[in-house]
Image: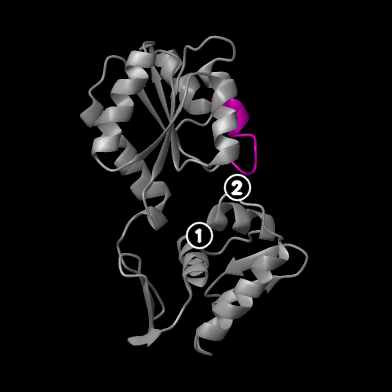
């Protein structure tokens, strides 16, 4: 899965420089010149991480980040604040509104790429190709294979994506709408009950020893848990 980076920067030359550098190392880039256009881009395609300039016309970057972190759908998206303001108080303020990192201009594109990689590795393990194993259930993202105690299981592509999402977000309840947004994307319009169909298929594909890991939470949604 190619990570999507939303660049929110009003200065076109800087935005283009970041876009070119990050594209070269494999990221999918979404560009926005201000907070309003960033929100429109996010409605079409939720990013995996955002790089946001502090000083922008209209709504400032810090106000934008504060609003993003207050919304249930977007509050988990990590943010790197980019600014020419190097004072300690400014850095603290940026982190207090929810930014995960803070970079002062000028900076090298190589350093930006490295910081994005580090944050995604920590906050979004589902974006890596490293195998994931839970109690003998093993997912191999690079080959889209699933094994239960070394026995290969047959999963459809959607069921694989759902299981991949679950094993990288364990012990937390997600509503059908949230699963749709995270697995299918926020710009895809599908009935929420479609999730139930794919959950049933996923449970059927898992052996009896593992289908209980995908738990129904009445009135709330679904949860992946190793606890009974």
Quarter containing the N terminus:
bottom left
Q: Which mark is residue 190?
A: none
Question: Can residue 192 be found in the magenta stretch?
Answer: no
Q: Is residue 58 visible?
A: yes
Q: Give the foreground label among 1 and 2.
A: 2
Q: Is residue 209 above or below residue 100?
A: below
Q: Quadrant of residue 41?
A: top right
> Circle 1 — which element?
loop
Name the colour scheme.
one colour
Q: Which mark is residue 186?
A: 2
Taking the image as shown, residue 178 lies to the left or right of residue 7, namely right
Image position, residue 36 (x, y; %): 60, 22
Q: Quadrant of residue 68?
A: top right
Look at 22% across and 23% down and name the residue there.
Answer: 108
Q: Is residue 148 above or below residue 107?
A: below
Q: Quadrant of residue 172?
A: bottom right
How far apart are the two marked residues, 1 and 2, measured between alpha carbons? 18 Å
> Circle 2 — which element?
loop
Quarter containing the C terminus:
bottom right
Label 1 crowd bin: few (<14), some (14–19), many (20+), radius 10 Å: some
Give the labeled residue for mark 1. Answer: 169
Q: Between residue 173 and residue 10, name the one nearer to us.
A: 10
| Mark 1 or 2, nearer chain start | 1
Image position, residue 163 (x, y; %): 49, 69
Look at 35% across and 65% down and name the residue there.
Answer: 141
- Residue range corresponding to the magenta coloring: 64-75
Image position, residue 78 (x, y; %): 46, 38
Q: Is residue 56 above or below residue 68?
A: above
Q: Is residue 75 visible?
A: no
């Amino acid at each position: 899965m190619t990570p999507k980076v939303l660049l929110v920067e009003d200065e076109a030359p800087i935005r283009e420089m970041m876009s070119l550098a990050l594209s070269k190392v494999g990221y999918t880039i979404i560009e926005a010149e201000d907070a309003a256009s960033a929100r429109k881009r996010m409605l079409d395609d939720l990013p995996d991480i955002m790089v946001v300039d502090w000083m922008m016309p209209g709504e400032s970057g810090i106000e934008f980040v504060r609003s993003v972190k207050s919304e249930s759908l977007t509050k988990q998206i990590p943010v790197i604040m980019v600014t020419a303001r190097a004072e300690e108080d400014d850095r603290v303020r940026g982190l207090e509104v929810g930014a995960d990192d803070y970079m002062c201009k000028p900076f090298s594109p190589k350093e930006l790429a490295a910081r994005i990689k580090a944050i995604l590795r920590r906050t979004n393990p589902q974006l890596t190709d490293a195998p994931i194993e839970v109690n003998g259930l093993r997912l191999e993202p690079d080959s889209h294979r699933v094994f239960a105690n070394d026995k290969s299981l047959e999963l459809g592509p959607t069921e694989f994506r759902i299981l991949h999402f679950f094993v990288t977000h364990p012990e937390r309840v997600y509503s059908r709408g949230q699963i749709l947004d995270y697995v299918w994307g926020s710009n895809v319009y599908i009935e929420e009950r479609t999730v139930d169909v794919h959950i049933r298929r996923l449970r059927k594909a898992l052996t009896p020893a593992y289908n209980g890991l995908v738990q129904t939470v009445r009135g709330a949604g679904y949860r992946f848990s190793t606890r009974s």
